[in-house]
Amino acid sequence: MSAVPEDVVIVGASAAGLATAEALRNKGYGGALTLVGKENRLPYDRPPLSKQILSGAWEPERVQLRDAATVDRLGARLMLGRTAVSLDTAARRITLDGDETIGYDALVVATGVGPRRLPGDDLAGVHVVYSLDDALALRTELLADPKVVVVGAGFLGSEVTAVARGMGLRVTLVDPMPVPMRRQFGERIGTLVGRMHEEHGAELRLGQGVARFTQTDGRVTGVELADGGVVPADVVVVAVGSTPGTAWLAGSGLETANGVQCDPQCQAAPGVWAAGDVASWHNPHFDRRMRVEHRLNATEQGLAVAENILGGQKPFAPVPYFWSDQYDVKMQAFGIFPEGAETTVLHGSTDERKFVVGYADGGRTVGVLGWNSHRELRKLRRLVVDAARLPDEIPVAAGRQS
């Protein structure tokens, strides 16, 4: 293969896939470009699905990342509504549904993630929120004033709970962890998230796994918990995590344990790169392998992949940025938040619900989380960029800690 490929195929008409395609063209790539997407839609933004789309604040058209004319100017062959089913890295060919094959000089895997499933979640009234169609279908059911159970208290489950309570619905949030968002931000912040949901009228059933869904005539009627109790439900939202979209890569020779395994340049094999939620790579800044399911990372990684396809050798070493909107709270975060990290309040007060918390791992700051504190968080991001030691926590008398 020449230094600059003549035929680039991107599998995944996602934010990452679109960012890669646009960056290639912006950097002067004039060769053939193909964008394959399993949904019969132009690329669209996913974070608003569990917030603005579900609440009805936005019309569906607003999540589209680019209009048709802008996409057309990329000069790419669009293969929407098509699914990649296998990859032959030796022959550099991809097989699509219908046994059609397409060749490539350079391949970008940007197939994202799919929702993790639970047994029985094919019942009527049980929903996931992965696609635009998922969010619209759930919104239709929420408009009928149902009793709602949300299974999973991470980002997605917490956001759906906030939207449903904002609609005045009866909502129960279920999770086996003792507090919401514990996996994301630890016990300290999770406790505050739990209080926030309770203050807004959600019922929490925490420390409880799900045994099964109860049903009548194929429609869900409740969620049976591990202790045998049943929470009645007309609608259940399953938000128990995701799985990387790598099933089609079986037999390809690529390593796909928890995503497509890449080097620091996001390259998985000769002629193959990965970007977005599906990519697992070694981030030199944190000196660890990671897979990041956040919107901004998809764009940044797409840009990095495009540069490296065209001959660059720059490691991808971002400080991830992400956010969550729940009720009147905006949580924003830079970095990573490993289990067991030391936490320190760097600004404000958890009592007043306006603060920034730093997270340290191995003696260096690896993450900062802001709760309704955008300006201060931007300043304190430097601690993560510089891998600095955490400053001392502000005194209780001055900071009024909870």
Image: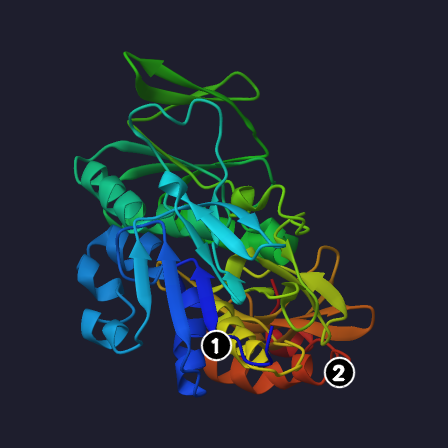
Residue in front for this viewpoint, 283 or 341: 283
Q: Which residue in the protein does label 1 denote?
A: 373
In this rendering, the label closer to the viewer, 1 or 2: 2
Of marks 1 and 2, which one's residue comes earlier in the chain?
1
Residue 282 x/y as whole percent: 71, 66
Local SS, label 1: loop
Residue 121 x/y as whole percent: 41, 27
Residue 194 x/y as whole percent: 50, 49
Identified by mark 1, the residue type is: Ser
Instruction: Name the outermost residue toward the top.
Output: 217
Residue in front for this viewpoint, 221 or 249: 249
Local SS, label 2: loop
The CA span between labels 1 and 2 is 21 Å
Sort mark 2 into few (<14), some (14-19) or many (20+) by Cα contacts within 10 Å. some
Identified by mark 2, the residue type is: Ala
Sort mark 1 into few (<14), some (14-19) or many (20+) by Cα contacts within 10 Å. some
Q: Is residue 202 left or right of residue 193?
A: left
Q: Which mark is residue 388?
A: 2
Q: Which mark is residue 13?
A: none
Tally the numbered discs: 2
Compared to residue 309, the image places residue 292 above or below, namely above
Q: Residue at x 34, y 48 (%)?
A: 82
